Structures are given as structure tokens and as C-alpha cells.
Amino acid sequence: MTISLEAIFMKKYKAAVFFDLDKTLLSPQKHVYKENIEAINKLKNNGILPVISTGKNQYELNEIIKESGIKTIVGSNGADLFIGNSHLYQVPISTEILENISLEAYRDNIALAYHSSAGVAVSLNNKYTKSLFTEMHRPIPPVIPEYYYTHKILMLLVFIPASNNLLELKYRKKFINLNFMRNSKVTIDTVAQKISKAYGIKKLLSLPELSGIHTFAFGDGDNDISMLKSVDTGIAMGNSSTNVTKVADYMTDDYRSNGIPKALSHFNLI
């Protein structure tokens, strides 16, 4: 299905608001809060474009898109930009880099999760993969170490616990052509070099239909830092990491306490 930009951007928007998902727009059960849905509808009625900006991949977003009514997506931590089913661009990790990091991970007995826009597979299963996907309310992915030979991999999850600083540092130094972003106690979001949520936002805002509009963003995790710094007004959730609160322009309430509607009201967006 192809959606023309004219059909999406049929009017000049006053502003755009970018939303992270986990611990921002979504409940702990991975649904969009009713209050957030109401706020999104008010944004649309006020001529403001809502955008999801997330580390999640297209195959993970169908229900969230349906619940939220948001069609414009910066996905895979900036490696994928799509509106409906139309991809404006994708930046996959090269096969050569995937081969190298997969070999290194095999030697270190580290699990990798290979994310494409269509699905996910892991190089191996261990307590960290099982813990993460259970917490995300998702089935444990199949073990397919060769998955990256048959799919474009937009994002990796590297399963190194935060307590293992030396091992994490080794990967950051060895694979300088990748962008590593710690996003949980057991995983590091990993995309191609220079890719980030900020990159995806910049690509979206380069469209003539969106040039010059004021931009806001909501986030809570370290992979949101580039996004909050790249917009005009970066808003940290009350549950944000210390690193996020340091770069934010404004701090709202916790995601479980209507932090998004409260901030949107504060800035007279709804």
C-alpha cells in the first residue's frame, strides 16, 4: 500500500510532537493510555502532527499504531522512517559488520537479537533474552544465527548486562562503525553509525511540508537523548534517567500519572 505525502500532510502543521513508547506513551502492559489517546486526538484537531519515535521495529508496532492513531513513525532508533506502509528510507547494518559482530559475540557467548522490519531472530537464547522478551510481553524469538543473510537488519540488541562495563567498552571500541545505546540493564540498542532518533527526526523534518515548524519530544531513556536535544523543546518524563533530565528543557510527571497530557496542556498544545 502506498500513501502519498500529500494525503498525509494535507495541511500546514503548526508543530510536531515526537513520542517515545516504553515508559512514555505506553502503559506497563504495552498499551496506549486512554488519556494519551485523547491527548493525541486533541493534537490532531489543533493542527499538530503526532509522531512515534521509538527503538521498536515496524513488525512490533501494528497494535500501537492502531490504538494511538499515529501513522508517522521514526522506528528502529532512527534507522527506519515510514508513514503507513510507505518507507521514506531505511538504513540497514551492512552484512560485513553483522558477520564481524556475530563472530565476536559467538566467541564471548553473548546473545544478539537481529531486528528487521518484518521480524526478529536471536543468535542464541539465554536468561537475558528470555527475561527481556518476557518483560516486553513478546514470544521468545527463534534461534536463527544466519537471519541477517536473508533480511535487512535495521537494529541489533546486544545482550551485555550493564554490570559488565569492560565487555561493553570492548564492543564500543572494536565496532566504531556502530552506534551503541544502552536501553536496559541487559541490552544495548545498536544501529548503523550516525543513526539515531535525531537522525530520523531530521530526515522527516527535511520534507518541504514540515519545514520550519516547532518541534517537541517526550522521552525517558538514554536512547532518547539525541531526540530531546534535536527538537525545539525536549520534555523528560518524571521517571526519566538522570542523563535524560540533564538535557531536557522541561520535566513533566511520571508516565503512569498523565505526564504527557499535563505537559501538552502546559505548552498550550491541547
Image (tube, rainbow, N blue to C red):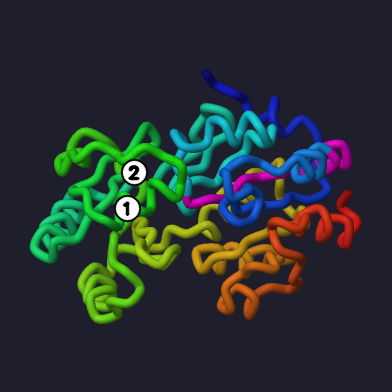
**Callout 1 secondary element:** strand
- Give me the residue at 26% from left, 40% from top: 121
Labelled disc at residue 14: none
Q: Give the range drawn in magenta.
A: 42-55
| Residue type marked 2 | His
Q: Distance between the residues labelled 2 and 1?
A: 6 Å
Residue 42 location, quadrant: top right
Relative horizontal placement of residue 5, taking residue 118 as reference (left or right): right
Q: Nearer the viewer, residue 180 or 183?
A: 183
x then y, percent, for residue 143:
19, 40
- Give me the residue at 30% from left, 57% from top: 128
Q: Which of 63 and 170 is in front in this view?
A: 63
| Residue type marked 1 | Leu
Instruction: Give the residue furthest to the top.
Output: 1
Q: Nearer the viewer, residue 137 or 4?
A: 137
Q: In this view, does 269 lie above or below 13?
A: below
Residue contact at pointers 2 and 1, CB within 8 angstroms: yes
Residue at label 2? 115
Q: How crowded is mark 1: few (under 14 residues within 10 Å), some or many (20 or more)?
A: many
x then y, percent, for residue 167:
23, 75
- Give me the residue at 57% from left, 31% from top: 63
Magenta-colored stretch includes residue 45: yes
x then y, percent, for residue 258:
78, 55
**Callout 2 secondary element:** strand
Relative horizontal placement of residue 269, taking residue 73 as reference (left or right): right
- Give me the residue at 34% from left, 43% from top: 115
Residue at label 1? 156
Q: How crowded is mark 2: few (under 14 residues within 10 Å), some or many (20 or more)?
A: many
